[in-house]
Image: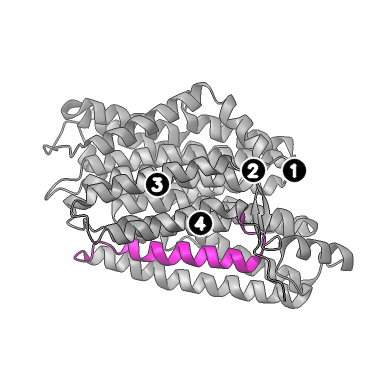
Amino acid sequence: MNFQLPDLTPIVPELLMTALALFVMLIDLVVKKKEAVAVISMAGVALVALTLLGPRGETFGTMFISDGYSTFFKIIFFVNVILSILISIKYIAIERVNYGEYYSLILFSTIGMMIMASAGDLIVLYLGLELMALSTYILAGFIRHDIKSNEAALKYFLLGAFSSGFLLYGISIVYGLTGTTDLKGIAAFIVERGLYDNVSLLLSILFLMVAFGFKIAAAPFHMWAPDVYEGAPTSITAFMSVGPKAAGFAVIGRVFLVAFAAARVDWVTILIPLAILTMAVGNIIALAQTNIKRMLAYSSIAHAGYALLGVIVANNEGLASMMNYLMIYAFMNIGAFAVIIMLRSEGFKGDSIYDYEGLSKTHPMAAALMLIFMFSLTGIPPTAGFIGKLYIFMAAVNAGYTWLVVVAVIFSAISAYFYLRIVMYMYMRDPKVTVSLSTSFSSGVALAVTTAAVLIIGVFPTALVEFARMAVKGF
């Protein structure tokens, strides 16, 4: 029997990331200064990112696909991991959880996201999802002496396990119906046998939608997000709000637009009320929040609703606008969390929105940065958030969903209240407590990068928009 090793070229970034994560675990045993472990992690990720320029293709019998679509999402993951590590260095030292395994867990979680983005098979998708989720469960409870962090990890784990059950049940129905877990094979079988209206197929789509809805924190599967975002370390909240959400959208795009393309009418009919409910829950409940991390959790839910519009459009323009939106969201959301981390010091958490009262008078630079990120999250020009919403709304209008865009714009207007309330507190109130900023070189770099990205993309969006469109060509 001749055994031939599959072509490993398309999976090189994942192999190198795995080697990096294992290396970081080992050097943690000998390196005393954990800041050095963080620097090695970031340098390694930057080098691995260069391999994305290499050859693309399929391997392991189309189970793993490296294409423009997966590459775009991997760039989001790399941006997320580098910025998250930058804002973590000082923060985990303040929280007294400065352990080296923190960085290796972030890297393992990112590997899971990368596998999800390239999954051409439902089994590979599940493997990537579990690697990402298991690492993130641990990170959510990383502040072991904080009961809120423990609670966040436990809730995330229990509800995550529940959603994984839905995913596996959905996969088992698809396999029983089509005899394959390969996405293209499923699509071919549905077309060949005319299973467009099959009840079992619709049931499997529903189960998969529940599982993916949990990962992107879409209502009514969002119940974990506020508690987990509030209890988890703030740097991990930033990491979770971008990476797993983008990975969830990556698999939604590939599974629904490849495997279930023939059943488009059915799943779009389900996604439309889901998107409206997600925008409603996120924006309306955020109005009542006084904890800024919980407010940003509901904000994150609302943004998942906007991004779902790109999937509902179900064409390349919609996909490109969704990808563009997620890239922009990564910069503006991590930037907002970086400012929150700046306010964290010994004995002062800075989690309440009232902690921002009079910030412009005590720390004008921090207030100005927060203003930029709040404007961007609201969607006010000339920030990148406006560009993200503009292109996703244009794609929906061009596809004939004008009424849905009107609904989204109304909810977007509602969101202005809770974002701009922070700006009002910073600039129109007098400071009640003296806040000392916990600044460091690494968090300064993260803030500089995110601020520059939000402003540059807002003024010159063409490069990112065209890059997203190129990434989905031939999808």
**Label 3 or label 2, whichever comes before in sequence order:** 3
| Residues in magenta, as a range | 118-146
Identity of the residue drawn at 38% across and 47% down: 296
Question: What amino acid is labelled 1 in the image?
Answer: Gly
Crowding at dot 1, Cα within 10 Å, few <14 / some 14-19 / many 20+, comes out as few
Vertical position of residue 441 compared to residue 161: above or below: above
Q: Are marks 2 and 1 in contact (CB under 8 Å)?
A: yes
Question: What amino acid is labelled 4 in the image?
Answer: Leu
Q: Which residue is mark 4?
A: 15
Crowding at dot 3, Cα within 10 Å, few <14 / some 14-19 / many 20+, comes out as some
Crowding at dot 4, Cα within 10 Å, few <14 / some 14-19 / many 20+, comes out as some
Q: Which residue is mark 3?
A: 44
Q: Are marks 4 and 3 in contact (CB under 8 Å)?
A: no
Q: Is residue 126 left or right of residue 269?
A: left
Q: Which residue is mark 1?
A: 474
Q: Which residue is mark 2?
A: 68
